[in-house]
Image (cartoon, grey):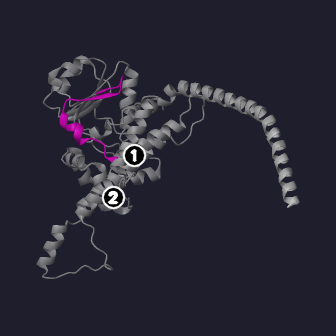
Amino acid sequence: MDIFKDFYMNLNEQLSKPLTDALFFLEKRIIFFGSKVETLCSFQYSLISLFPDLIRNLRNVATPALHFDHNSLEIINRDNKEKIERYGMPLSIFGKGCFFQPYIPLQQIDMLISKETTSYIVGTSNAIFLHNKECKPDVIVNVDDFTIEYRNKELEHLVSLTPADRKFIDEIIKIVDNSWDDGSNDILFDGSDPSIRSKFELYLFSLLYSIKLYITSPSESAIQDKIQVDNTIETFDPNKLQPITQEYIKKELLSDFNVDWLKAWINTKNYNLWDMSVGEKVLDVPIDGHPCKGSSALDGVEISLRNTFKDLNIDKKMEPLKQGFNTVLSSAESTFAKFVDSTKKKETPIAEKTTTSDNKIALTANEIFGKL
């Protein structure tokens, strides 16, 4: 739980940086660097655990020569088994040419520069890996200060967050913030490891559903070609169910996931393996796109501003000023109250004198009117 708290609290501080998980799909060369080995490894395993059933299938991923092998052991949870089979989990992001080592010793640096290696995800506390040009990392993730350095500049754009992604991450951050209490030993579901994993699971399944729906749907041009071949003329009928086209799906569903990133993922080996392993059963359970579908760019601006103010600790820095202002205000109120009391006391004799004078004038007037 600690690693999730650290990860998302620091992600909250730099929300403009994209999710590291998005890089895992693209089969790139990623080095995680950190001085504390335990934290370094836990950080990577926490990210791996966000991919459904992947952490249970890491037996043959330590070298680029091994093939990814699915664990054939029976899955105890029946519901989980159905989801895994329907969506083709786990994704084969590791396999021949792509390996994973949460901590790689210096003696194995040759594995990174081997011709057999096309991509890797490794962790190290040795800076030699960062400065060796032959390792050619695309991305370096510093676990100590939670920074991401893009050696491959194109990737920064590919994995940039859409407004829907930003809102999705912001909601997770708020849940973790609200549920985390250092003074309490109570464990709530919201903000717990299973809660966070379930949200990322929904995100991934929504993505896979949207892609499969896009692939299996006709394009507008294909529909028009079919109409011309059939020599039929169709007019728009509002009462008739219109076909779902790829253009519609791209606009309404896929755009929330970053289309450029999707194009890059579709060209990877693990996507092709997934596409071949699953049929249209992915579409058995309809999912209405991105979990935060319909978010606008203004939502992203609002989130950035809110997190910026939080980063600057405005509330804490303004606290002395607030206290000083409250003290001055209380003093001013007290002084004003004393001033009002003293003014009332001074005005009382004048008021009485004025009343007596007014009575005299009134009597004089009555006498005059009486005489008339």
| Label 2 crowd bin: few (<14), some (14–19), many (20+), radius 10 Å | many
Q: Label 1 is placed on what type of residue?
A: Lys
Asked if residue 116 is among those painted magenta in the image, a careful observer would answer no
- Looking at the rendered structure, the secondary structure element under dot 2 is helix
Residue 150 sits inside the magenta stretch: yes
Residue for badge 2: 282
Asked if 332 appears above or below 197 in the picture, the reply is: above
Instruction: Using the image as rendered, state which of residue 63 and residue 160 is in the foreground.
Output: 160
Which amino acid type is marked by label 2?
A: Val
Q: What segment is highlighted magenta in the picture?
A: 141-163
Q: Reading the chain from its start, which is encountered first: label 1 or label 2?
A: 1
State the image quarter where residue 92 is shown: top left
Disc 1 secondary structure class: helix
Task: Report x, y in % for residue 350.
Answer: 78, 36
- Residue depicted at 18% across the width and 47% down the height: 267
Q: Residue at x 44, y 44 (%)?
A: 171
Is residue 134 visible to us here?
yes
The disc placed on residue 167 is 1
Q: Total of numbered circles in the picture? A: 2
